[in-house]
Amino acid sequence: MRRKVIIIGSGPAGLTAGLYTARANLEPIIFEGMQPGGQLTITTEVENFPGFPDGIQGPDLMDLFRKQAQRFKADTRFTHVDKVDFSSRPFKVWTGDELFESDAIIIATGASAKLLGLDSESKLMGYGVSACATCDGFFYKGKEIAVVGGGDSALEESLYLTKFASKVTLIHRRDELRGSKIMQQRVLDHPKIHVQWNSTIEEMVGETQTGGLTGVRLKNTQSGEISVFRCDGVFIAIGHQPNSDLFKGQIELDSKGYIKTNPNSTYTSVDGVFACGDIQDSIYRQAITAAGSGCQAAIDAERWLESQN
């Protein structure tokens, strides 16, 4: 099957790109991948997306994105792309044994927050456990929270969360922080931030039916001692991993694995392949910025296709 545009990935970037390309009569296929709707589908209340003054549940927001794209005949499929070939046009995309060809590709596979990998963490995600301080910090006004990590991401999140929380405890597995010296000093000097050294989280404590997270079970990495630390929220800040393994050797990536795009555009190193959202944005990582770059990618792809005629 051949289409003018194939979009790999969903979320705000992929589905916005689908909406714009569909309205341009490009009849896109959107392969939504392993997490249809992207990271917002594991978020509960979204209060910072314009147009929803009372907030909206993350999965509900992504359903609206999808329905709007489908209204203009975007072909959305809950299918995972296994292999791509960008070496010549038409570009080739495989889902299982099925081959699709396309004149242009938009990549919107996003990035995933690195998590601790605990069952209790996934169970309480959105119920006191978060991986985005900018998204969820507002919900913790006057509360005591914890941040996990020791690099610049964790230090930045801790400082940001002091705007809302009464106390922020930074849980770090070592006896010294890994972030930049200036960020370390800001954290160590801040009256609201306390550092819990040489500690790892063994388990998140709480139940989704009874108010969510109530604390964490900590293990001291030196003594092995187990203790329960009471808090109202935990923010995991151990970094993000761009979902770019599929494109290694096909397209230019930066040292962290994010797709490189040309300045002020969504053009990649391969002519006719565009990237949008968190797969090429390691700075903002917001639903609204991802949606905006999805619009940009669609317009770039439409104009590029016109130039090929």
Image: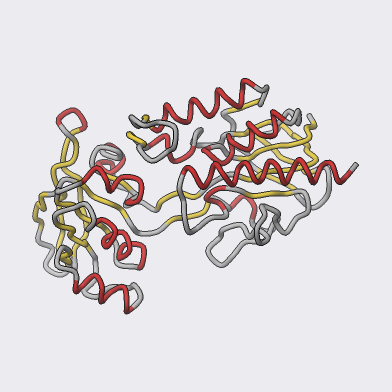
**Of 183 and 119, the residue lying toward us:** 183
Vertical relation: 259 (above or below) 38: below
Count of numbered circles on the image:
0
Q: Is residue 206 left or right of residue 181?
A: left
Q: Residue at x 20, y 73 (%)?
A: 188
Q: Is residue 125 left or right of residue 203?
A: right
Vertical relation: 253 (above or below) 119: below
Percent position of residue 161, x then y = 25, 56
Percent position of residue 211, x then y = 16, 33
Vertical relation: 102 (above or below) 164: above
Q: Residue at x 70, y 54 (%)?
A: 267
Q: Quadrant of residue 15?
A: top right
Q: Residue at x 21, y 74 (%)?
A: 175
The N terminus: image quadrant: top right
Q: Residue furthest right?
A: 309
Which color scheme does this rendered protein use?
A: secondary structure
Q: Quadrant of residue 68?
A: top right
Q: Residue furthest bottom?
A: 181
The C terminus: image quadrant: top right
**Of 19 and 246, the residue lying toward us:** 19
**Of 253 and 296, the residue lying toward us:** 296
Percent position of residue 235, x then y = 28, 51
Q: Residue at x 49, y 50 (%)?
A: 111
Q: Quadrant of residue 237?
A: bottom left
